[in-house]
Amino acid sequence: MITSTMMDVPLQVRRLLEHGATIHRGSRVVTATGTGTHETTFADIARGAARLAGALASLGVQPGDRVATFMWNNHRHVEAYFAVPSMGAVLHPLNIRLFPEQIAFIANHAADRVVIVDNSLLPGFAKLLPSLKSVRHVIVAGAADRGVLEGTGVGVHDYESLLAAQPVTYDWPDVDERAAAAMCYTSGTTGHPKGVVYSHRSIYLHALAEAMPDAFDLSARDLMLTVVPQFHVLAWGLPYAAFAAGTSLAMPDRFLTPEPLAAFVTAARPNKGAGVPTVWVGLLQHVEAHPDADISSLTELVVGGSAMSETLMRGLDARGITGLHAWGMTEMSPLGTFSRPSLDDAEEDVDGHRLAQGRFAAPVEARLLGPDGEVLGWDGESVGELEVRGPWITASYYRENDEEHFDDGWLRTGDVGTITSDGYLRLTDRARDVIKSGGEWISSVELEGHLAAHPAVAEAAVVGVPDEKWGERPLATVVIKEGEQADAAELREFLATKVAKWQLPERWAVVPEIPKTSVGKFDKKIIRAAYAQDDLNVTTLG
Ligand code: AMP
């Protein structure tokens, strides 16, 4: 082998920080305050990060120690995103929406040593603290009555005073690019949540790829409304990509319901955004009902975490906003695919491609496996389970011997779908959500998409329920829009114009809302359990 002449420079989070803080020093992090906005620059973030690293070191944080956050999306959280990995420690954003027992399990499993907590989350956190076994220090961000943490035996500190005592520079260590930089736990739909540990290298490579034009297309001219929580796959890696590209960030903090979110958009005027479909559906419904709400600054919204329905895509189109579909997982940092039209697209293919999950980012390799483990072709028709591999895809779970999710160097995604010959992934379902009726598969996602297109339907979730004759049949649960009316018979008739007769659900329930997981996806486990316990008012038709 001839050795290359290239320098061997480690890919480190610290380099993203330094790049953003110098080249893009004026780029901003705008945080919602409820009454207005708080603005800070990337240069300020870097000074804050250096101070935070000094403060953590003064509390005894060593390389490799886990520093958790219990925070909303805001400027201090961005400081922690850079300070903790850059000093050689491991950032661990905790999902504040999980049940306390789950949060305790996760924090104990990760052995978090320090937790940085937003003041607005302190009451809930105080109840949790006694069950967090490894935590030695709690740093409270924002004015708060820290007395609620007294008597717990841990050190309690105020974020600003702790940082004020530190210099605005930090002698960042030269960490190994393969060392752990951050970790997140999967939402854990079955069994315990599982930890995924990202390296400096994986975060750096992912940040560059995410900024590319056929992905998030990030530049120093953009302001990205980052609604996806910082505890959900590191806000899809956006803060790191933003520092690479100079993209300003609009952070909604705890103001996530449609009304304050719309007000934040009006005040901050972001041109792009990223979040799960539910958030955008809520925002659109709000703007429809309140024509004075001004979201005209938005031109592109990235929809990921769950499938973007055609109704959502069209609703965004009607407002001059392009809905872009992205697919990924906690295990994948998360970027897997992104859907943007290409020059080769025939006109009639454009919308179909936009509704597909998209094409794979360059370093992500994919294959589809059939029921007998055979590798299927990319013909746009063969349906199989998707497996992936690549430099920002996890090869194992943290401190867990799990073979079931890995297959000979590939990650088994648990997602089921097709891939076209030009690489468009189209998911038809989760392996566990697909409905197996008399030996045929019914896609719950497809039925949900059609139902959501009915003018009276606000949301619809379809799950498989046991059926004596067919093994499993679909149960449709729907939320009717305020002021509208539709019954099961009408909805079934409507659906009959869209799908084959044998796919039509016999069981229907109109519900006040669809239960959601901690990261805003339909919680189908809860719907199945409600059905099993006879808690749903089910109408049977057909
Ligand atoms: P999480 O690790 O919580 O981000 O969940 C990852 C899972 O969310 C994936 O395996 C998919 O099942 C689902 N998901 C993510 N993005 C999409 C998308 N664009 N369309 C459909 N499902 C998605």
Image: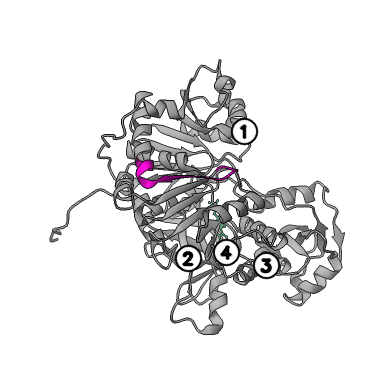
Q: Position of residue 241 (x, y in %)?
A: 39, 54
Q: Report which quarter residue 245 is drawn in.
A: bottom left
Q: Position of residue 331 (x, y in %)?
A: 47, 51
**For the N terminus, which image quadrant?**
bottom left
Q: How would you rate the neighbour count of disc 4 (Cα within 10 Å): few for under 14, some for 14-19, many for 20 or more?
A: some
* Callout in the foreground (1, 4): 4
Q: Which residues are magenta?
A: 33-46
Q: Which residue is mark 2?
A: 338
Q: How would you rate the neighbour count of disc 3 (Cα within 10 Å): few for under 14, some for 14-19, many for 20 or more?
A: many
Along the horizontal axis of the image, is 505 left or right of 408?
A: right
Give the amino acid type for the residue marked by disc 4 in the picture.
Ser
Q: Which residue is mark 3?
A: 449
Does the beta carbon of the residue at mark 3 sit less than 8 Å from ligand 1? Answer: no
Along the horizontal axis of the image, is 188 left or right of 457?
A: left
Does the beta carbon of the residue at mark 2 sit less than 8 Å from ligand 1? Answer: no
* 287 or 149: nearer the viewer: 287
**For the C terminus, which image quadrant?**
bottom right
Instruction: Name which of mark 2 and mark 3 comes first in the sequence.
Output: 2
Q: Position of residue 532 (x, y in %)?
A: 78, 49
Secondary structure found at label 2 = strand
Give the amino acid type for the residue marked by disc 1 in the picture.
Pro
Instruction: Name which of mark 1 and mark 4 comes first in the sequence.
Output: 1
Which disc number belongs to residue 100?
1
Does the beta carbon of the residue at mark 1 sit less than 8 Å from ligand 1? Answer: no
* Callout in the foreground (2, 4): 4
Give the amino acid type for the residue marked by disc 3 in the picture.
Gly
